[in-house]
Amino acid sequence: MIFVTRKAHFNAAHRLHNPKKSEEWNRETFGKCNYPNWHGHNYVIEVTVAGEADPDTGFVIDLGKLKGIIREKITEPCDHRNLNLDVPFMEGIMPTTENLAKAFYKELKEEVEAIAYDDSVLYSVKVFETERNIAEYCPYRMKE
Ligand code: NI
């Protein structure tokens, strides 16, 4: 199996806040990410497709086309936006790094797999909120 990864980035604002919990709980749990008037992150994402290479092209997936899908589905809707308020597919979802990784995966899966070679799959989506805070969604690994 071959793993092919395309990287992208966007800047966005968010706030982590659970309205079911007290102000104190939210401050203690989310720290700076709970500041009431939003704050930004320079997000980096890594989208990984796994499969075999097409014998005609040598590609698991055409990275130019993958770039276009990531732009349309993720970076256009998210870049310079507020992830709590502006992004339709994040409605009602707390924009933690974990939840973003899962939501991005769901947004990308169908279109990515439609253009990937044969039965290649969207393997994982990794989201870097900072250089040191990273979440990865990978449904295949969960089944092991
Ligand atoms: Ni934050």
Image (tube, grey):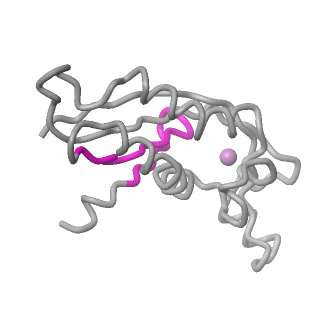
Quarter of the picture holding the N terminus:
top left
Q: Residue at x 71, y 58 (%)?
A: 16
Q: Position of residue 142 (x, y in %)?
A: 28, 65
Q: Position of residue 143 (x, y in %)?
A: 23, 68
Q: Is residue 95 depicted above or below 23 in this figure? A: above
Looking at this view, name the residue that lies furthest to the right.
37
Q: Is residue 94 left or right of residue 47?
A: right
Q: Residue at x 76, y 54 (%)?
A: 84
Q: Residue at x 40, y 50 (%)?
A: 136
Q: Is residue 63 left or right of residue 19?
A: left
Q: Is residue 124 depicted above or below 28 in this figure? A: above
Looking at this view, name the residue that lies furthest to the bottom.
20
48 or 131: nearer the viewer: 48
9 or 42: nearer the viewer: 9
Span highlighted in magenta in the image: 120-137
Q: Residue at x 52, y 32 (%)?
A: 44
Q: Position of residue 29 (x, y in %)?
A: 65, 65
2 or 129: nearer the viewer: 2
> Residue 42 lies in what quarter of the image?
top right
Chief SS of the magenta region: strand
Q: Position of residue 102 (x, y in %)?
A: 49, 56
Quarter of the picture holding the C terminus:
bottom left
> Residue 21 lies in what quarter of the image?
bottom right
Mark count? 0
As for residue 135 lying within the magenta part, the answer is yes
Q: Is residue 39 left or right of residue 135?
A: right
